[in-house]
Amino acid sequence: MAPEDAALAPPTLARPALLAAAQAVDTWDVIIIGGGATGLGAAVDAASRGYRTLLLEAHDFAKGTSSRSTKLIHGGVRYLGQGRIALVREALVERARLLRNAPAQVAPLRFVVPVYSRWEQLKLRIGLTAYEWLAGRYRLGRVRGLSVAQTRAALPNARPDGLLGGVEYFDGQFDDAALAVALAQTVFDHGGIALNYAPVTGLIVRDGRITGVRGHDEITGQALAFSARVVINATGVWADDIRRMAAPDAPPMLAPSQGVHVVVDAAWLPGDAALLVPETDDGRVLFMIPWQGKVLLGTTDTPRDDSPFEPQPLAAEIEFILRTASRYLRQAPEPGDIRSVFAGLRPLIAADPDAPRSELSREHVIRVSPQGLVTIAGGKWTTYRQMAEEVVDCAASEAGLPGRACRTAHLPLHADPAPAAGERLHPQLEVTEAAVRQAVRAQFALTVEDVLARRSRALFLDAEAACAVAPEVARILADELGRDADWLGAQISDFTALARGYLMRSAG
């Protein structure tokens, strides 16, 4: 089946038909394992070049790290101080491309940094002006100093004691899960297939070369096997698990780090400006960002030796975020004000197993195993497209595929029409029956979690309200998917258990 014959519109295909279409291809040019930012980006890149492309995700698209970001598309202001100019410049160019190619998911965001010392003010003006200069024609706005009155107008809840003014600059904001779904839809637009809930359980090896994958479909229980000319491992913090399917003694590439975010009501940061804390106690930056009617505070950087699919925030991480926020806010949120708290794992590259955490790379690497498995790890959402271009170039070369130029620098991503207006299912959430049905019919949602965690962001915005609305969402899903009462009850129970991890009282 040639790519041009595989124009599969996701809303028109039930799960069995979609699996049959995937199995109808004798040999895929490229199979990608992992449905996060990197894997989805690689699938869009490969499919848009005309390669026969299949993506397999073990859970839902962006279930892991890719739905748990700080919701920023940015160059990395703090990397300037580390002298990583090329990394910052690349990210700023990619930021501009995302704003152009995905306007439904990405938009400019105004930042204000309140300053309490003249030296800090000078450093910020110099650093942010350099940041703007590196963006060149892709800049989003001018850096400018603000008076005390202007700073207080932009940040009414900023701590007034000792305030000397502020510095204003612009960056990009996005909805990470929505962008992931748009990428999955774009794969289909270009003749590829992307399957969620299709875990890979093994690699097919013939004559010392990887020639395909084995797995199963979580929805139907059907065993799956696909042949491919090349396999890309884009599974983020779980990349070492896939590598060890081919080489059980493969040394680890990754040293995961946990980042935690706290969500509170908009009253704690009134207005439309984000607040940047330029340096926390651990040398990081901390963001306070207006997001979907709430405020997102974060993030932390805590080493982990494991890689759970639902990492839990630590009480010390939450306390660190609230304590740091209290230094910059006149009235600061307390634990009882938290609406949701979520954790995500960063796939940091550990070149040296004994390297200190501060030296672990945030950049990406591509490695090819002796059996031909192409693994990409590291990186961030902002540079996903550049990472995808590089890994598809590498995979095409490894497989001897015909050389075809990357098309994604100017490729618009799929954009869904807004769902029909309707009554909210819960007064605190922007979730309607029409939106739930659209999530199933056009956006690959198959569970209550899919709808309330990623097609809407209810779980991340207000975990208690998400629990309250889960039964009604389950009922609508059961109607759409033809499920029985047992399935409905299990969905409510599973989601309620999941949501406990996002409630403040569960942090430990």
Image (cartoon, helix red, strand yellow):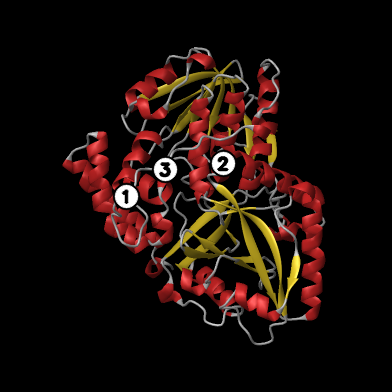
Q: Looking at the image, which is closer to me, 205 or 505?
A: 505
Residue 252 appears anywhere in the view: no
**Disc 1 marks which amino acid?**
Thr
Tell me the crowding category of disc 1: few under 14, some 14 to 19, or many 20 or more residues within 10 angstroms, Cα based.
Answer: some
Q: Using the image, tell me which numbered label, if any, was put on residue 37.
A: 2
Instruction: Give the mark toward the camera: 1 or 2.
Output: 1
Q: Position of residue 21 (x, y in %)?
A: 41, 18
Report the residue at 77% width, 56% height from top.
Answer: 132
Instruction: Give the mark toward the camera: 3 or 1.
Output: 3
The quadrant of the rendering that contains the C terminus is bottom left
Q: Position of residue 341 (x, y in %)?
A: 45, 63
Question: Image height check: is 214 above or below 252?
Answer: above
Q: Using the image, tell me which numbered label, if any, was put on residue 432.
A: 1
Disc 2, SS: helix
Q: Which residue is mark 3?
A: 418
**Disc 2 marks which amino acid?**
Ala
For marks 1 and 2, the one nearer the N-term is 2
Tell me the crowding category of disc 2: few under 14, some 14 to 19, or many 20 or more residues within 10 angstroms, Cα based.
Answer: many
